[in-house]
């Protein structure tokens, strides 16, 4: 087998990169509708580079849920990157700064395409795919955020319904196992029960506790 | 510093740290099994809660409105295996049209 190149990763991710651009545009538009200006939205995409967490921040701030709830929800959503980054840790060589920068290119999609047929992960596939996704995501956000500021009332455009649709679309591929489905149903039920009684954001944090059903005795 | 920028900075810092855990700190070691199980269920639980709060959330109340029509359209689009952008567009469009008609 010939050695892989960064270009192979870029090619593998191309179809998903198109989706990442449009996803970035929708984040920019929705962020604008939630009161996040174009610069802040673009900086967030460049520094956080994780779709669902960014949408969570925009939706919670847009619903006046407060910084603490927004940051906590986003951090919980991104907690999966700890085990994901651990799974590819041996691929990253070189100095501390290089490993730190390259590790930021780890997203669900770049991680998924870097898994080779033999079950091992490939560094050049991951970095090549990650770079393409990064440019797509940040560029899409800037376009959407600048265009979004020119939009009228988001409710007239149905943009408030775009959020739950998006989260549902992100949820579906996550519930392939019975345990994951149980965590999702439990989390949804907890959120619905707390909705009438707590400030925005709290139901989401409380629902995160549903993940404890995954605890196995050490 | 505005609320938005504080959130941007904190979420950015937390995410950078989470992604760097493996490559920078652990160098090949893996999480204990009992923790991996918990962490892998965080995303489904939080995403489901986001669906519920975004579709039925109000000011400390459950509000059922045109957003439900949008979520229904999204379910249909997902069932037809439509791409993400189509799913989101179907939800927004059907909600906007419902608001125009009702």
Image: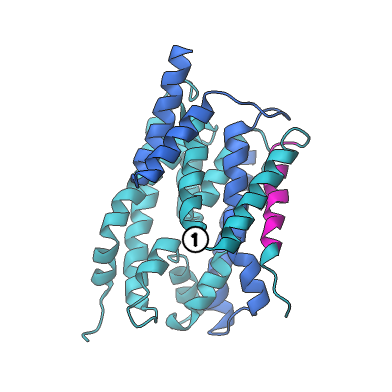
Chain colours: A cyan, B blue
Depth check: give the residue in front, A13 or A118. A118
Could you tell me which residue is drawn at 73 percent across and 30 percent down?
A: B60
**Residue to which mark 1 is pinned:** A176
Could you tell me which chain the residue with mark 1 belongs to?
A
User: Which residue occupies the extreme right position in the image?
Assistant: A197
Does the magenta segment cover residue A210? yes
User: Which residue occupies the extreme front position in the image?
Assistant: A178
Could you tell me which residue is drawn at 68 percent across and 39 percent down?
A: A192
Task: Write the start and end of the magenta stretch as one range.
Answer: A199-212
Whether residue A41 is visible to the viewer of this picture, yes or no, is: yes
* Helix, strand or loop for the magenta stretch, by majority: helix
- The part of the image, by quadrant, that contains residue B17 is bottom right
Q: Position of residue A19 (x, y in %)?
A: 33, 49
Could you tell me which residue is drawn at 51 percent across and 72 percent down?
A: A85
Horizontally, residue A64 falls left or right of residue A142, namely right
Q: Is residue B78 above or below residue A7?
A: above
User: Which residue occupies the extreme left position in the image?
Assistant: A2
Q: Is residue B13 above or below residue A23?
A: below
């Amino acid at each position: 087998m010939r050695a892989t190149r960064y270009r192979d990763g870029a090619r593998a991710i191309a179809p998903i990169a198109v989706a990442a651009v449009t996803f970035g545009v929708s984040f920019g538009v929705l962020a604008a509708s939630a009161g996040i200006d174009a610069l802040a939205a673009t900086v967030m995409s460049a520094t956080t580079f994780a779709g669902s967490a960014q949408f969570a921040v925009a939706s919670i701030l847009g619903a006046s849920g407060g910084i603490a709830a927004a940051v906590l929800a986003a951090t919980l959503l991104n907690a999966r990157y700890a085990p994901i980054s651990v799974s590819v840790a041996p691929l990253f060589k070189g100095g501390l700064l290089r490993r730190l920068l390259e590790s930021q290119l780890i997203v669900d999609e770049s991680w998924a395409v870097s898994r080779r047929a033999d079950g091992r992960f490939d560094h050049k596939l991951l970095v090549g795919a990650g770079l393409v996704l990064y440019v797509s995501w940040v560029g899409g956000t800037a376009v959407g955020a600048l265009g979004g500021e020119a939009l009228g009332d988001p409710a007239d455009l149905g943009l408030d319904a775009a959020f739950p649709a998006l989260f549902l679309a992100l949820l579906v591929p996550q519930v392939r196992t019975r345990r994951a489905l149980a965590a999702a149903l439990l989390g949804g039920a907890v959120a619905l029960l707390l909705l009438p009684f707590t400030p925005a954001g709290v139901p989401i944090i409380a629902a995160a506790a549903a993940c404890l059903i995954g605890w196995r005795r050490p | 510093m505005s609320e938005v920028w504080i959130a941007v900075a904190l979420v950015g810092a937390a995410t950078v740290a989470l992604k760097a855990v493996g490559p920078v700190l652990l160098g090949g070691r893996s999480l204990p099994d009992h923790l991996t199980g918990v962490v892998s269920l965080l995303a489904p639980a939080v995403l489901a809660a986001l669906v519920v709060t975004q579709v039925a959330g109000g000011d400390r109340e459950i509000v059922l409105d045109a957003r439900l029509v949008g979520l229904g359209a999204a379910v249909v689009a997902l069932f037809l295996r439509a791409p993400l952008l189509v799913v989101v567009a179907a939800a927004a469009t059907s909600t906007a049209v419902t608001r125009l008609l009702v």
